Image (cartoon, rainbow, N blue to C red):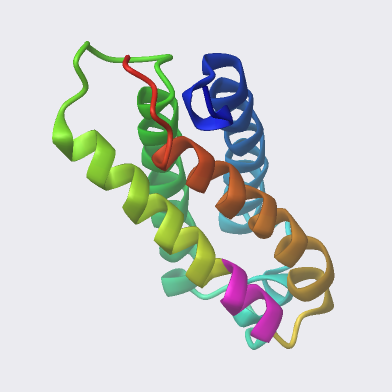
Amino acid sequence: MTYLSKPNFVRNAANIASIFFAIFIVIQMLAAAGVFPVSMLWGGRQTELTPALRVSSIVAVVILGVFTYIIRYRAGFLGSVPQPIIIRIAAWVVTAYMILNTIGNFASVSNVERFLFGPMTIVMAIASLIVAASKLEV
C-alpha cells in the first residue's frame, strides 16, 4: 500500500492545503477591503488599490473557495461516492494552477510574495498534488 492510498496521509494533505487556502482567502478579503497592502500582491507591481484590483481580490476569494471545495471533495471529506470524474480532473487543475501560482510568486518583485507566499504555495501545490494523485477509493 502506497502513501497515496492511505486515507490519513491524503486527508492530512487536504487539511494542510485547506488551511493555506483559508489564509489566502483572508489575505485577499483584507486586500479587497483595503487593509492588506496591494503592493504585496498581484506581482508587487501595483501601488494603489483600484476598483479592478478590488474585484480581482474578490474573484480570487471565490476561486480559492472553489479550490478548497475541490480538494476536500477529492480527499473524501465531502460529496458522493463514487466521485464524479469532474472532481478528479478539477483536482489536477487546482494542482496545475498552484504550480503556476508558485512560479508567479517567485517571479514577483514583492519580497512578501517571493519569500513568504512562494514557499506557502509550494506547500499548497505539493498537498494538492498528493490529493489529486491519490488512489483513494472514496
Magenta stretch?
102-107
Measuring from the top left, give residue 72's x and y in whole percent: 44, 26
What secondary structure predominates along the stretch shown in magenta?
helix
130 is higher (above) or lower (below) than 112? above
Q: Is residue 136 left or right of residue 39?
A: left
Residue at 22%, 11% in the rendered image: 81
Q: Nearer the viewer, residue 15 or 31?
A: 15
101 vs 136, nearest the viewer: 136
Q: Residue at x 15, y 27 (%)?
A: 84
Residue 115 in the figure: left or right of residue 24: right
Q: Residue 104: say if magenta.
A: yes
Above or below for 50 versus 127: below
Q: Position of residue 118 (x, y in %)?
A: 72, 66
Residue pictured at 47% horizontal, 47% vertical: 61
Q: Is residue 30 magenta?
A: no
Residue 95 image point, x, y percent: 44, 54
Tell me if residue 42 can be seen: no
Horizontal and vertical percent position of residue 4: 51, 31
Q: From the image, which quarter does the C terminus lie in? A: top left
Q: Nearer the viewer, residue 137 or 78?
A: 137
Residue 120: quarter of image: bottom right
Q: Is residue 75 left or right of residue 9?
A: left
Kindly tell me whether residue 86 is visible in this rendering: yes
- The residue positioned 47% from the left and 24% from the top of the image is 5
